[in-house]
Amino acid sequence: MDTTRPTWQPPLIWRAAQLLARVVVALLARLEVSGDVPEALRRGPLILAANHISPFDPVVLAAACRARGVSPRIMATGGLFRTPVIGAAMRRAGHLRVDRGTAAVGRALDDASAAVSGGSVILVYPEGRIGLDPGMWPERGKTGTARLALACGAPVIPVAQWGCHEVVPYRAPKGLLGGIARSLVRRPVVRVHFGDPVDLADLTPAAPGAALRATDRIIDAITDSLAPLRPDEPDRPRHVDPGRPVDTSRSQRRRRA
């Protein structure tokens, strides 16, 4: 990949939103960010692959990325883009729409590939949804993130987060006000860790099973980065959201670091 080309420049509206995210997170939680993004990768091309545990994740990740000097374009569900105000802001900020469960979902990968090839930093959720594993460990991933990485040759950095589920409940906006009120009083700790790039050097897009193997490596890397963030919650989370369903059909066997 030619990294000498001019990289994508985050619009003012997105840089301002990241600053606002830091303020919002500071009001509701105590944010702890560890690890780093190498300076040479902060302007892209780069793929950030994060676990997904709460509707509050994008706000926390926007704040954490700001703390590390990164302005990623987020791959987000199409429903957000259909919201009158939020949708318009997301389009202006350069985020990428994913219409899950429709014939247009394949276009999201093409858009992401073009964005990464153009020098952008892309933030993706390899699980493809808010995880429903009973222990809140990363689920078995979809192959889209791996196929994107293999096709573009861009490095993948795992991003693990923990604590967002204590701020905003799974079924938000239902229960949102109660969650915010509790957080204003308790200000739970929310942790984000940027791990080391995932080694995919031995895999090529045309190799049989390459996307599946790359997906497992990415999910394993996120899991390994998550484990130190929840040392006192190794099996099940301390905070249990009664509105969160449980689905073990996509549970991934967790590999210890």
Image: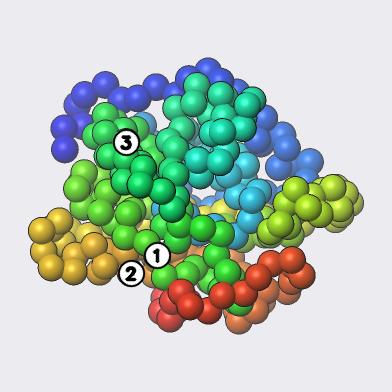
Q: Secondary structure at mark 1?
A: loop
- Label 3–label 1 contact, CB within 8 A: no
**In the image: residue 42, left or right of residue 64:** left
Mark 1 or mark 2: name the one nearer the start of the chain: 1
Marks 3/2: CA–CA distance: 23 Å
**Residue that appears at 73% across and 37% down:** 24
Estimate how packed mark 1 is, as few (under 14), some (14 to 19) or many (20 or more) residues with alpha carbons within 10 Å.
many
Q: Nearer the viewer, mark 3 or mark 2?
A: 3
Mark 3 or mark 2: name the one nearer the start of the chain: 3
Residue sticking out furthest to the left:
206
Residue sticking out furthest to the top:
12
Q: Secondary structure at mark 3?
A: helix
Mark 3 or mark 1: name the one nearer the start of the chain: 3
116 lies above or below 135: above
* Residue 196 showing in the rendered view: yes
Question: Which sits in the foreground, 83 or 141?
Answer: 83
Locate the N terminus by quadrant: top left
Q: Amino acid at mark 1?
A: Gly
Q: Quadrant of residue 130?
A: bottom right
Residue 217 in the image, given as x and y percentages of width and height: 32, 67
Q: Quadrant of residue 245?
A: bottom right
Q: Amino acid at mark 2?
A: Asp
Q: Which residue is mark 2?
A: 216
Q: Quadrant of residue 58?
A: top right
**Residue that appears at 25% across and 69% down:** 213
Residue 210 in the image, given as x and y percentages of width and height: 19, 65
**Residue that appears at 19% across and 26% down:** 4
Marks 3/1: CA–CA distance: 20 Å
Q: Which residue is mark 1?
A: 141
Question: Which sits in the foreground, 6 or 167?
Answer: 167
Residue 103 in the image, given as x and y percentages of width and height: 35, 47
Q: Which residue is mark 3?
A: 111
